[in-house]
Image (tube, rainbow, N blue to C red):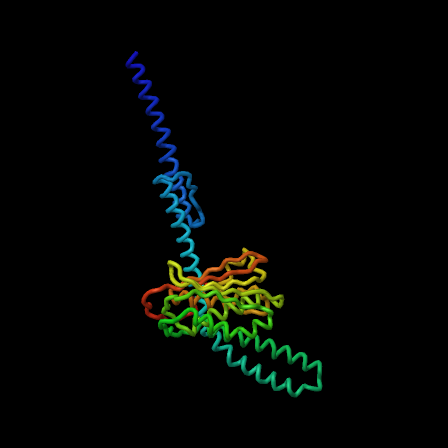
Amino acid sequence: RLVTFALIAIAATGLMIYWLVGRIVLQPVRKLAAATRKVADGDLSHQVEVGTRDEIGKLGESFNVMMHNLADAQRQLLQANKLASVGRLAAGVAHEINNPLTGVLTYSSFLLKRAEKDSEMREDLEVIVRETKRCREIVKGLLDFSRQSVSERRPTSVNDIVHDACRIVKNPLSMQKATIVLSLGDNLPQVHADPGRMQQVLVNLLVNAGDAMADAGGTITVTTDLVEEGVRIRVADTGSGIEPADLDKIFEPFFSTKGTRGNGLGLAIVWGIVEDHGGHLSVFSEVGKGATFTILLPLGPPTPARPSEGTQA
C-alpha cells in the first residue's frame, strides 16, 4: 500500500510539475518562438501578449519594446533611403528644368504685357505665367531638397530660433486669423545646431499649421522644454488634423494634403534637417482636433557635420 500510495503521489506531483512548467515556462516560450518566426518573415508589428510579471513576462515586454524600436528604425531607414534617392535625382533634374522654365516665364510675362487689349489671350497667358511660377517653386524646392551643404553648427538657443521664426511668419499667419501662443521653457541648455536651418524647420511647421486651419482661424502653440532625450520643441495647431492613413506618408517627398497649394517637399526637407542634427521628428494628430509636431534635439558635443543630401521626416 505504501509503495502504491508513493507511486500515486509521485505521479500526481510529476503531472502537477509538468502542468506548471508547461503553463509558466513552455507556453510563453512557444509564443516568443512563434513571434521570432514572424519577425524573421518580416512582420515587425507583431506583439507578444504579456500575462505575467515574472522573468518570462519581463522578457515578453522587452521583446515588444525591441519590436517597436526595430519597426521605428526600419521606417526611418526606408525614409532616409527614399529621400537620398530623390535628392540625387532632384539635383540633376532641377538644374536641367530651371533654365528652360525661366525662358518660358520670361517670354510669357512679356507677351502678357502686350496682350492687354485681348482679354481671351490675356487669360490664357495668365494661366501660363501662374503655372510656370508654380513649377518654378517646385524646382526651387527640389534644389533646396537636394542641396549639398555643410551645417554651420554652433551652440544655439532654441528659444531664440523660435522667436526669429515666429517674427517671420507673424504677418502671413495673422491674415489667416491664426494666433501664435508661446510657452517656452526657462534656462534651457543650448543645443549644437545650425540656426538658419533650424529656423527653416520652424517656419515650415508654422506655415503648415496655418494652412491646416485654412481661413477659419485658430491657435498655434509653440512649446519648448527639457526632457531626458534633450530639448523638445512642439508645434501644435487647432486645425483639421491629418487622416490616419496619411500619417505614415506626410514625410515622403511629393506627398501633400494641400492639393495644388503644396508641392510635398516641405516636410521632407524638415525631416532631413532634423535627422541631420541627430534629432527626431514625430507627429500626432486627431482628425478635427489638429496636429502636433514634436522635435527632439540631443544635448552634448556636436557631431561632425555631414553633407545634406535630401535626408533629414
Between 107 and 9, the residue placed more toward the observer is 9
Residue at 37%, 34% in the rendered image: 24
230 relative position to 102: left or right: left
Farthest residue, direction bottom: 114
Location of residue 22 (image quadrant):
top left
Residue at 35%, 32% in the rendered image: 21
Kindly tell me whether residue 84 is visible in this rendering.
no
- Residue 208 in percent (x, y) is at 54, 67
- Tally of marks: 0
- Residue 121 in percent (x, y) is at 68, 82
Location of residue 312 (image quadrant):
bottom left
Farthest residue, direction left: 3
* On screen, residue 257 above or below 169: above
Between 30 and 282, the residue placed more toward the observer is 282
- Residue 289 in percent (x, y) is at 57, 58
- Residue 262 in percent (x, y) is at 56, 69
Location of residue 30 (image quadrant):
top left
Kindly tell me whether residue 168 is visible in this rendering.
yes
Between 224 and 135, the residue placed more toward the observer is 224
Where's the N terminus, which quadrant?
A: top left
16 relative position to 176: left or right: left
Farthest residue, direction front: 186
